[in-house]
Image (spheres, helix red, strand yellow):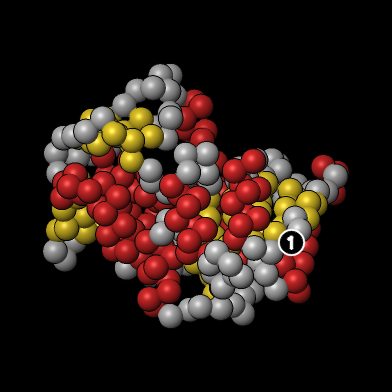
Amino acid sequence: MMRLEARRESDSPSTCMVKRSILVVEDEEDIRELVSYTLLKEGYQVASVASGEEALSVAEDKPPDLIVLDLMLPGLDGLTVCRRLRANPKTAGTAIVVLTARGEEADIVGGLNMGADDYITKPFSRNVLLARIRAVLRNLGLRREGAEGSADPDSSIQIHNIVIHPGRHAVMVDNKLVELSATEFRLLHFLARKPGWVFSREQILDAVHGDNYAVTARAVDVQVVGLRRRLGAAGKHIETVRGVGYRLKG
């Protein structure tokens, strides 16, 4: 059963100027309550569910700004939920932070490849959880502000057969819509703004996630692999420059 929570605006800390909506997906009640309470204290609007099926239903009905997603769920597992969220145009742009006990490298790679914006392992620090969520939401807000503030929200960038519409957060390849996660879209857009330029992993990480993102720059490799796969044959235009980083071939 879904639980909905909200705090009065007067109760929210001054650092949380806009009440962002967060959906917590966790089958363990104690952890679900802890994460929800932690987020409520920060002034977020919080809904919580205990299964992947409920998560998809709630997110489809009213997409939240961010989803905190466990991987080991009854019924639909978290990776399947993540994949379906990214495939649905209504939820493709929702930020996803995986929070799970599965901390092996293969699990992290799998989560990021499925479109997660961040990956946190249990046991976790509440302060780290909040910091990572703030960073993901900050990047989400910057993207939305950029789209709203654009003089021409439909202005596009075309590189080869890839067309990027920043205002609509849409990517077309050969006139067909390609569904990307928020992180994948930011990565492609960042490279496309200067085609032919080579960017280091650290530069890409800072541009896409912010300069306080607490993971190794090698996470960029995982995200590039995922982006190439989603772009299909057009993914070949993202080139690896050995010893340096990546570029989008102009």
Residue where numbered disc 1 is placed: 36
Residue under the image location 26 percent in, 30 percent down:
175
- The residue type indicated by label 1 comes to Ser
- Count of number-bearing discs: 1
Q: How crowded is mark 1: few (under 14 residues within 10 Å), some or many (20 or more)?
A: many
Q: Nearer the viewer, residue 116 or 76?
A: 76
Q: Quadrant of the C terminus?
A: top left
Q: Where is residue 68 in the image (x, y as percent from the top left)?
A: 60, 60
Q: Nearer the viewer, residue 171 or 44?
A: 171
Q: Which residue lies furthest to the front in this view?
A: 75
Position above or below: 243 against 9? below
Residue 247 appears left or right of 14: left
| Residue 22 x %, y % | 66, 51
115 up-or-down from 176: above or below:
below
Indicate the position of residue 96 as horizontal and vertical percent values.
53, 55
Residue appearing at x 82%, y 42% in the figure = 9
Residue 172 appears in the picture as rendered: yes
**Where does residue 102 sit, x and y in percent of width and height?**
51, 78
Helix, strand or loop status at disc 1: helix
Residue in view at x 29 percent, y 34 percent: 176
> Where's the N terminus, which quadrant?
bottom right
On screen, 91 above or below 156?
Answer: below
In the displayed structure, does residue 203 sit left or right of residue 158?
right
Instruction: Inspect this view and state whether residue 70 appears.
Output: no
Q: Which residue lies furthest to the top in this view?
A: 151
Task: Find residue 151 and report its image quarter.
Answer: top left
Q: Would you say 194 lies left or right of 139 here?
A: left
